[in-house]
Image (cartoon, rainbow, N blue to C red):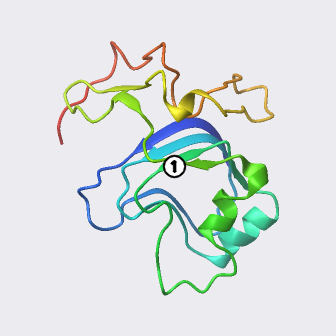
Amino acid sequence: TPTVSNVTFLGDVALEESNYGLLLRRGFAPTLSNIAMSGFSSGCLAIRDQATYDSFAAGASLTHSVAACASPYEESEEESETGTEEGIFEDGAASNRIVADLLLTDAWTEASPDFRPTGSSPLLSGGSAPDDAFFEAAAFVGAMDNTTDWTAGWTHHDAN
């Protein structure tokens, strides 16, 4: 039952299989907020079993998050759960949004990416920190605001 806030997940749309932003399964019962997801060819959100849907019904949450994937949710004809990814993500009380683009400064340049949102990014508003003193209050969604690249000077972006 982890609490996670202000994370950016970026995928590679060139991958054809098993490419999800969040794949929640096996009764996972998180408190997730301010999550930004983009670039996942199979979907930004996939929920795999009834136990995980039940955890959301019992209080697990995904709130104040933004998805920018061609297919926001996993599409599978084989699912038998009572519940849908849409029902979790698009619950009005969750304050989540689906957008066409996160509008990051230069996230897709392998050698020196810049993951900060641009001045017109949907990530700059709508954030809300979890009710936990461990977390700093953040009005933005994702890992960083548009002013500070906290990865500069200590991270490397070597090609795989």
Horizontal arrangement in the rendering, residue 132 relative to residue 140 (left or right): right
Residue at image position (23%, 31%) is: 109
Instruction: Count all numbered tags in the image, as a single digit.
Output: 1
Q: Residue at x 79, y 32 (%)?
A: 132
Q: Quadrant of residue 122?
A: top right
Q: Please tell me whether residue 148 is drawn above or below residue 117 in the rendered image.
A: above
Q: Nearer the viewer, residue 89 or 156?
A: 89
Element class at badge 1: strand
Q: Position of residue 137 (x, y in %)?
A: 71, 23
Residue type for callout 1: Ala
Query: Which percent across, then down, holds residue 24?
Result: 56, 62
Kindly identify which residue carries mark 1.
67
Residue 23 in the image, given as x and y percentages of width and height: 51, 61
Quarter of the image holding residue 4?
A: top right
* Residue at 43% in and 24% down: 118
- The residue that appears at 32% across and 32% down in the rendered structure is 107
Viewer-side residue, 1 vs 14? 14
Quarter of the figure that contains the C terminus: top left
Q: Does 83 appear above or below 38?
A: below
Up/down of 6 relative to 22, above or below: above
At label 1, counting other C-alpha atoms closer than 10 Å, the crowd grade (few under 14, some 14-19, many 20 or more) is: many
